[in-house]
């Protein structure tokens, strides 16, 4: 019964780990920096919103009215001066001279110039009229929309629209905000369940060890109990190899800068995301074309996967078989001496050190991107974290060491 419960917990943890990896991959795709900060369409939409708001809610302050009136007056004065210069230009024909004399007689440019301030004020009043502002806004926005909907150089637009549309349909949402909210909720639930099943699996192992303690003097139970213990170890190993162990997630949490007195904000822009299990790493290495990558993949496969599996099988064969088979060099080597060849414990330390080093490096690198000023604010976040698969793999390594010690104590044959 306990083994069945352990198997159920393991299946659920493995399933939830795969779901979490897929959901986070979808989240990363939907919020990738290429679809946000580096997307022409995103910039067009955000700038369009600002321009629309600025145009629709255009309002002149008293200071701006005064400055604009001065500008208008200067333009009108320039026009009057130009017209006066044209009138005063020497004429050759009699008709032109008569027209020039008439203009000088009936047109007083000084009186016209005296009316310029009042005329400029009237123009400003017309511009500030709500009806006129609405007409100007419509004209400005029509021209802006023409430019906005024209073809751009965003070569990834079709691919991006196809990706986001697919994700919207997959999760039953209609916008990126809804998608992020739903994925965030799903991930929070899955993470809680994953660690619940992870600690439940460890609880089952503690129960097994407790049974060993209370049955240590009952020799008749040693063999069947040890075989059952090996099955528990196999369950731990399978989950430890297939569940995600480490997750690298680097983001620009928030980029906020001021454009036309309004804030342009990009949130949760994913710079990099990757999540891998040990088997996932081996698969990636085998898919590389370089001989060095394949060689490393073979080493990890042999010493971190095949060796532990062979060791577990050999311990069971050694305990259950007759002396001739139990004393076989191959069986004894893997049952008692292969521990120093196995890299399972090395993998545990390597992943931990990689996490510590990588986490510190990413923290420093992302910290260099942080900027905080009146016009620009950039906040980065490093969500790199160890996953339940790592905890389960540690549990397997420690549990395997305990089983080796138990085997040496209960074996009826030579353990050397």
Image (spheres, rainbow, N blue to C red):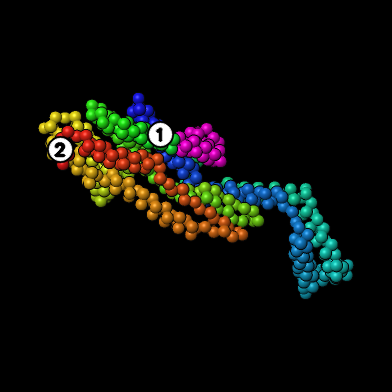
Q: Is residue 14 visible?
A: no
Q: Residue, x 11% and y 32% (percent of image)?
A: 324
Name which of mark 2 and mark 1 comes first in the sequence: 1
Q: Which residue is mark 1?
A: 200
Q: Residue, x 31% and y 31% (percent of image)?
A: 214
Q: Is residue 405 visible?
A: yes
In terms of image quadrants, where is residue 372? bottom right
Nearer to us of marks 2 and 1 is 2
Residue 415 vs residue 167: left or right? left
The label shown at residue 414 is 2
Closer to the camera, 140 or 264?
A: 264
Closer to the camera, 41 or 134?
A: 41
Residue 6 vs residue 327: left or right? right
Disc 2, SS: loop
Q: Position of residue 249 (x, y in %)?
A: 44, 48
Considering the whole magenta stretch, tell me its main secondary structure: helix
Q: Residue, x 64% and y 50% (percent of image)?
A: 50
- The quarter of the picture where the N terminus appears is top left
Q: Position of residue 148 (x, y in %)?
A: 59, 48
- The quarter of the picture where the C terminus appears is top left
Q: Residue, x 62% and y 53% (percent of image)?
A: 263
Judge whether 244 appears above or below 65 on screen: above
Region of the chain picked out in magenta, as a range: 168-194
Q: Residues within 10 Å of mark 2 (few under 14, many from 20)?
A: few
Closer to the camera, 23 or 223?
A: 223
In the current view of this chain or complex, which residue is farthest to the left? 324
Q: Residues within 10 Å of mark 1 (few under 14, many from 20)?
A: some
Judge whether 268 appears above or below 195 on screen: below
Q: Position of residue 270 (x, y in %)?
A: 48, 48
Q: Position of residue 17 (x, y in %)?
A: 40, 37
In terms of image quadrants, where is residue 227? top left
In the current view of this chain or complex, which residue is farthest to the right? 106
């Amino acid at each position: 019964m306990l083994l069945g419960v352990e198997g159920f917990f393991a299946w659920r943890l493995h399933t939830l780990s795969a779901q979490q990896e897929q959901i986070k991959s979808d989240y990363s795709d939907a919020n990738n920096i290429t679809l946000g900060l580096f997307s022409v369409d995103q910039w067009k939409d955000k700038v369009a919103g600002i321009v629309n708001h600025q145009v629709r809610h255009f309002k002149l302050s008293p200071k701006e009215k005064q400055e604009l009136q001065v500008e208008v007056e200067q333009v009108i004065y320039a026009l009057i001066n130009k017209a006066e210069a044209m009138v005063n230009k020497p004429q050759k024909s009699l008709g032109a001279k008569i027209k020039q004399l008439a203009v000088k007689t009936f047109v007083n440019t000084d009186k016209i110039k005296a009316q310029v301030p009042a005329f400029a004020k009237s123009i400003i009043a017309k511009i500030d009229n709500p009806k006129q502002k609405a007409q100007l806004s419509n004209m400005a926005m029509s021209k802006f929309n023409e430019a906005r909907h024209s073809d751009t150089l965003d070569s990834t637009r079709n691919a991006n629209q196809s990706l986001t549309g697919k994700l919207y349909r997959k999760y039953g949402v209609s916008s990126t905000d809804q998608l992020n909210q739903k994925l965030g909720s799903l991930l929070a639930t899955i993470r809680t369940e994953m660690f619940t099943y992870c600690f439940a699996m460890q609880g089952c192992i503690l129960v097994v060890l407790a049974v060993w303690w209370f049955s240590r003097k009952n020799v008749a139970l040693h063999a069947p109990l040890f075989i059952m213990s090996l099955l528990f170890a196999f369950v731990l190993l399978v989950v430890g190899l297939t569940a995600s162990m480490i997750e690298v997630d680097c983001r620009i949490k928030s980029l906020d800068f001021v454009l036309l007195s309004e804030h342009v904000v990009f949130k949760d822009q994913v710079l990099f995301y990757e999540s891998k299990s040990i088997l996932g790493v081996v698969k990636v290495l085998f898919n590389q074309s370089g001989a060095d990558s394949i060689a490393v993949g073979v080493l990890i496969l042999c010493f971190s996967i095949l060796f532990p599996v062979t060791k577990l099988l050999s311990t069971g064969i050694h305990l259950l078989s007759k002396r001739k088979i139990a004393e076989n060099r191959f069986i004894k080597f893997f049952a008692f001496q292969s521990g120093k060849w196995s890299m399972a414990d090395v993998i545990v330390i390597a992943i931990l050190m990689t996490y510590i080093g990588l986490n510190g490096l990413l923290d420093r690198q992302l910290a260099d991107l942080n900027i905080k000023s009146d016009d620009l604010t950039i906040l980065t976040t490093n969500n790199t974290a160890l996953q339940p698969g790592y905890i389960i793999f540690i549990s397997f390594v420690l549990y395997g060491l305990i089983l080796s010690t138990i085997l040496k104590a209960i074996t009826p044959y030579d353990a050397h």
